[in-house]
Amino acid sequence: MASPATSPAMQTLRLLVGAVVGTIFLMAVAFSFVLGFAAPPLWTVLVLLLFGAGVYVVLERTGYRVAAVDPRLDPEQARAQAIKAFQSSLILRLVMAEAVAIVAIVLAFVAGRTVLVYDVGAAVSVLLLAVHVWPSIRTVDRVVSGLERDGARTGLREMLGFGGSKEGPVTRLG
């Protein structure tokens, strides 16, 4: 069985998320040449932190919603549907998490004319990306629980290198 480090599907997803995180940092470097380093207006920091908190709540409540896989599908079709659903939900979570950095770009140029406004939004975005987007056992399990809620077995954990089902007498109580 492949580990998360060697699973081709996981490598592709981590490369995608890593590229977005890297771009956020590179933008901070680029903006440091264009914008000043003055203290950001307090209201911009508060707007970005509140927006980030709102995005966190939306990600927690809706970011992992996926359609359940039909238990009557053959294993190959179930796996294909599962990886497609995982990739789609990951992209959706990525876009929502990155929205904070995009709003920070606008505020940095309009309100503050300082790179530090962008840096606050970038930090919030990177934190959201690390918690909700980076493909990990936590994010995989949250999606798998939705995919398999009707009794289907998708094999998504195995495909992404995290081993088999989490079922057992302690984890499945009823």
Image (cartoon, grey):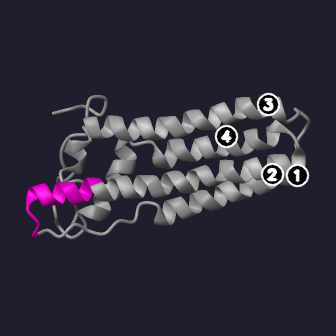
Label 3 and label 1: CA atoms lie apart by 16 Å
Which residue does the image show at 57% across and 52% down from the upper left? 97
Which of these two is toward me, 105 or 41?
Answer: 105
Q: Which residues are magenta?
A: 72-83
The quarter of the picture where the C terminus appears is: bottom left
Check disc 1 and give the amino acid type: Ala
Which of these two is toward me, 19 or 126?
Answer: 19
Point out the frontmost of discs 4 and 3.
3
How far across and down, in percent of the image, does residue 152 sit? 16, 64
Check disc 2 and give the amino acid type: Leu
Check disc 4 and give the amino acid type: Ala
Q: Are marks 3 and 2 in contact (CB under 8 Å)?
A: no
Which residue does the image show at 64% across and 61% down from the upper left? 54
Label 1's element?
Answer: helix
Q: N-terminal of the two: label 4 or label 3?
A: 3
Residue 75 quadrant: bottom left
Q: Which residue is mark 2?
A: 107
Label 1 and label 4: CA atoms lie apart by 18 Å
- What is the number of the mark on residue 123? 4
On screen, residue 19 versus residue 164, left or right, reads right
Point out the frontmost of discs 2 and 4.
2
Q: N-terminal of the two: label 1 or label 4?
A: 1
Q: Which residue is mark 3?
A: 32
Which residue does the image show at 11% across and 66% down from the upper left? 73
Label 3's element?
Answer: helix
Q: Are marks 2 and 1 in contact (CB under 8 Å)?
A: yes
Whether residue 156 is in magenta: the answer is no
Q: Which residue is mark 1?
A: 111
Label 2 and label 1: CA atoms lie apart by 5 Å
How far across and down, in percent of the image, does residue 13 sit? 38, 41
